[in-house]
């Protein structure tokens, strides 16, 4: 009889322990326990690299954007095919003068060029894959002028397009909202267009040198 009582007591304690463990696992399952961006960094046939973002840089961007950054990746374009200056048959006698006050000054473009909002309602891991993105250099000028003239004067191809295969996966656990944005990192160039020694127009060129991939997490979880 005594042995039977001890056996029932052991069974009761075992069941109580298992129930507590199961409850703990269920209650923790609804929390956002992981959020990361995986990006294929295999540099074979890649035209970009991933640079480290310091804590100070991240803090400055958070102050500029006005929200906390959950994940950040710095994508820097690789100039594998540098623009080679060519002789341009300039029958119209156009010349370009770079009048940028601060040359080669990097600017963090605050405009979203890509944004994805993801909402995960289930207590399980889910992922979203994102494909190709095209980043292009461009210029503005009032005259129908050959883009090669501007390219030669500024030292880079103002019509170049960079197609980057991000091949990334955003993973979130638990109930969460996430916004993924791609911000361009660009150089601005102001220039004047001259014809026969006289200024006839002004323009602006931008050179895309990279981008910042930023994930914002919304803490307001639904029940």
Image (tube, grey):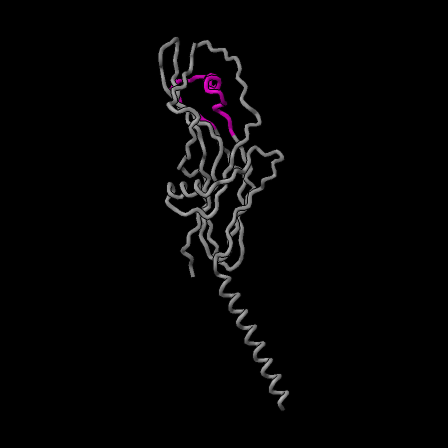
Identify the residue at horizontal 35%, vertical 13% (top origin): 199
x, y (%) of residue 88? 50, 13
Foreground residue, 93 or 153?
A: 153
Does residue 13 show up magenta in the picture? no
Q: Quadrant of the C terminus?
A: bottom left
Residue that sits furthest to the bottom in the current view: 1
Instruction: Judge by depth and name the residue closer to the eye, 213 or 138.
Output: 213
Q: Is residue 190 left or right of residue 131?
A: left
Which contiguous range is marked in magenta? 137-161
102, above or below 68, in the image: above
Residue 215 at x, y = what percent? Answer: 46, 46
At which x and y percent is residue 10?
A: 60, 80
Residue at figure coordinates x 62%, y 83% from the top left: 7
Whether 217 is drawn above or below 136: the answer is below
Which quarter of the rendered picture does the N terminus lie within?
A: bottom right
Position of 70 with respect to 201 (left or right) is right
Q: Is residue 203 above or below residue 170?
A: above
Q: Is residue 50 left or right of residue 117?
A: right
Residue 108, position in %: x, y? 42, 35
Q: Is residue 154 magenta?
A: yes
Residue at 51% from the left image edge and 69% from the top image edge: 23
């Amino acid at each position: 009889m005594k042995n039977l009582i001890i056996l029932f007591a052991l069974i009761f304690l075992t069941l109580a322990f298992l129930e507590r463990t199961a409850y703990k696992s269920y209650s923790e399952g609804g929390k956002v326990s992981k959020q990361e961006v995986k990006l294929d960094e295999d540099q074979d046939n890649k035209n970009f690299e991933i640079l480290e973002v310091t804590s100070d840089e991240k803090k400055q961007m958070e102050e500029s954007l006005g929200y906390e950054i959950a994940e950040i990746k710095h994508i820097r374009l690789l100039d594998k095919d540098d623009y080679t200056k060519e002789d341009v048959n300039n029958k119209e006698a156009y010349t370009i003068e770079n009048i940028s006050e601060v040359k080669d000054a990097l600017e963090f473009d605050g405009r979203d060029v890509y944004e994805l909002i993801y909402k995960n309602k289930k207590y399980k891991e889910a992922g979203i894959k994102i494909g190709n993105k095209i980043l292009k250099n461009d210029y503005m000028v009032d005259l129908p002028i050959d883009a090669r003239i501007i390219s030669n004067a500024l030292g880079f191809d103002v019509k170049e397009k960079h197609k980057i295969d991000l091949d990334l996966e955003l993973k979130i656990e638990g109930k969460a909202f996430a916004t993924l944005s791609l911000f361009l990192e660009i150089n601005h160039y102001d220039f004047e267009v001259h014809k026969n020694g006289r200024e006839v127009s002004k323009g602006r060129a931008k050179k895309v040198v990279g981008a910042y991939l930023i994930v914002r997490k919304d803490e307001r979880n639904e029940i």
